[in-house]
């Protein structure tokens, strides 16, 4: 596959600015709302009187229920992104988010944990349908020489959204402890803002209006994987993307428990650690965008993996202080930002225009297979390792992925 044949024409300087920033703002709101709801429910679970085993199971279940829809519905999201205007898909999904947040408000009002977990599941469906259009539209909005930069901005705003969403979840849990339904109403109001922003995204034409509905996500996924395997760069990017999300989910789940059990932090302190990680990823993503210099810079992947590995070494040390741990988290995030930006750019630029949504859907399925796998691995590692040592495991996995990328492209890296 020749990537140059699949790229959209370069856009005039003034044609992409407004639409690009509306897309970025919509994604910022999406990340904020996702993480505010999920973190709020997890913190409410931690505040319930229950055994440690019940608490760990509930936290794991919350993560799994958010990941499962991506496995079940991402291929549908890819179909919608190819069959219809990506802007229309995103606007309709944002409308559904308003209803989901109102449902979450009802779940909080009833103090029903099953309904709260169902709200997480519904929000996962929302994001599974939103994701392929969000990523696949970027090459249609941006000139190719801006693609790595645009991905850096996308990751920065995504993780700024994660910061504020995580902090908001902690603040909501603290401020509205006696009336959590207020949190759901506030999140519904934020969702209205996201819907308004989505209307400013460019109304690009459908990439493949004759695309047939793919009812079986398993056979559709298999077909897309076989197509990706025929493109070595695209396949490696897909594997790297899956590994990244496995590590990220494992770090995030373990971080909640480490902050609670080892550092003995409050809900706000717990949120501040997530914020430190997100700041690091955002800064690393922007650095990767600028370091790419208008192209896809593969060398950033092993470099980022090495930074991730080194940053986890102090995190598992006995007696580490909260400031020292926070500094290591920022470094871990910085390495993660360097790691993921070139991978994302490859996934966007390599597929043919009429198949970009399907490829993004398949990549999303596998990334959340990684996230779902991390919930089981985290459960197993809790029996074998301390919370701090689990961070060592995360660093080792990152190093292995980075080493694979460096080895597979060794001729280019040494040229």
Image (cartoon, rainbow, N blue to C red):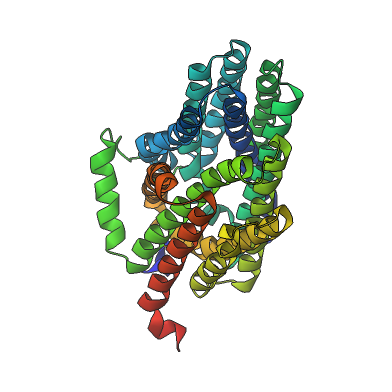
Residue at image location 65% in from the left, 57% down from the top: 319
The quadrant holding residue 269 is: top right
Image location (x, y in percent) of residue 151: 58, 58
The quadrant holding residue 341 is: bottom right
Regarding residue 61, the answer to whether it shows in the image is: yes
The number of callouts visible is: 0
Regarding residue 1, the answer to whether it shows in the image is: no
Q: Is residue 202 left or right of residue 395?
A: right
Residue at image location 48% in from the left, 36% down from the top: 63
- As drawn, the residue found furthest toward the top would be 110
Front residue of 178 and 93: 178
Q: Is residue 257 left or right of residue 217?
A: right
Image location (x, y in percent) of residue 20: 64, 50
Please state, as top left, top right, bottom left or bottom right, where the C terminus lies in the image: bottom left
Image location (x, y in percent) of residue 392: 50, 60
Front residue of 118 and 127: 118
Please state, as top left, top right, bottom left or bottom right, where the N terminus lies in the image: bottom left
Residue at image location 71% in from the left, 36% down from the top: 266
Residue at image location 58% in from the left, 20% down from the top: 104
Up-down: is 312 above or below 104? below
Up-down: is 171 above or below 415? above
């Amino acid at each position: 596959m020749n990537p140059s044949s699949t790229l959209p024409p370069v856009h005039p300087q003034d044609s992409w600015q407004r639409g690009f920033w509306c897309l970025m703002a919509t994604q910022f709101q999406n990340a904020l709302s996702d993480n505010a709801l999920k973190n709020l429910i997890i913190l409410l679970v931690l505040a319930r009187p229950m055994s440690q085993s019940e608490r760990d199971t509930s936290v794991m279940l919350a993560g799994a229920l958010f990941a499962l829809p991506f496995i079940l519905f991402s291929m549908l999201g890819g179909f919608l992104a190819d069959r219809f205007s990506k802007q229309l898909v995103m606007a309709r999904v944002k409308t559904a988010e308003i209803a989901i947040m109102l449902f979450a408000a009802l779940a909080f009002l009833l103090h029903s944990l099953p309904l709260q977990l169902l709200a997480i599941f519904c929000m996962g469906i929302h994001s599974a349908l939103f994701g392929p259009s969000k990523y696949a539209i970027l090459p249609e909005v941006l000139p190719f020489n801006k693609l790595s930069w645009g991905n850096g901005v996308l990751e920065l705003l995504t993780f700024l959204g994660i910061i504020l969403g995580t902090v908001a979840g902690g603040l909501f849990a603290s401020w509205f402890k006696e009336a959590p339904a207020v949190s759901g109403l506030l999140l519904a109001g934020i969702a209205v803002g996201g819907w308004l922003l989505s209307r400013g995204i460019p109304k690009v034409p459908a990439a493949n209006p004759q695309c047939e509905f793919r009812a079986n996500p398993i056979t559709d996924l298999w077909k897309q994987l076989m197509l990706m395997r025929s493109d070595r760069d695209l396949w490696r990017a897909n594997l790297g993307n899956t590994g990244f999300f496995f590590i990220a989910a494992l770090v995030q789940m373990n971080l909640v428990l480490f902050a609670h059990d080892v550092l003995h932090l409050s809900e706000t302190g717990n949120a501040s650690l997530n914020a430190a990680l997100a700041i690091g990823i955002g800064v690393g993503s922007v650095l990767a965008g600028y370091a790419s210099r208008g192209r896809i810079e593969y060398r950033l992947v092993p470099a980022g993996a090495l930074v991730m590995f080194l940053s986890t070494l102090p995190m598992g040390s006995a007696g580490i202080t909260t400031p020292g741990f926070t500094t290591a988290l920022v470094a871990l995030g910085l390495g993660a930002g360097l790691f993921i930006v070139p991978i994302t750019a490859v996934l966007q630029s390599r597929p043919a225009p009429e198949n970009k949504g399907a490829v993004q859907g398949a990549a999303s399925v596998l990334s959340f297979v990684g996230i779902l796998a991390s919930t089981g691995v985290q459960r197993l590692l809790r029996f074998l390792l301390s919370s701090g040592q689990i961070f060592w495991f995360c660093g080792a996995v990152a190093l292995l992925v980075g080493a694979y990328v460096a080895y597979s492209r060794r001729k280019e890296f040494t040229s």
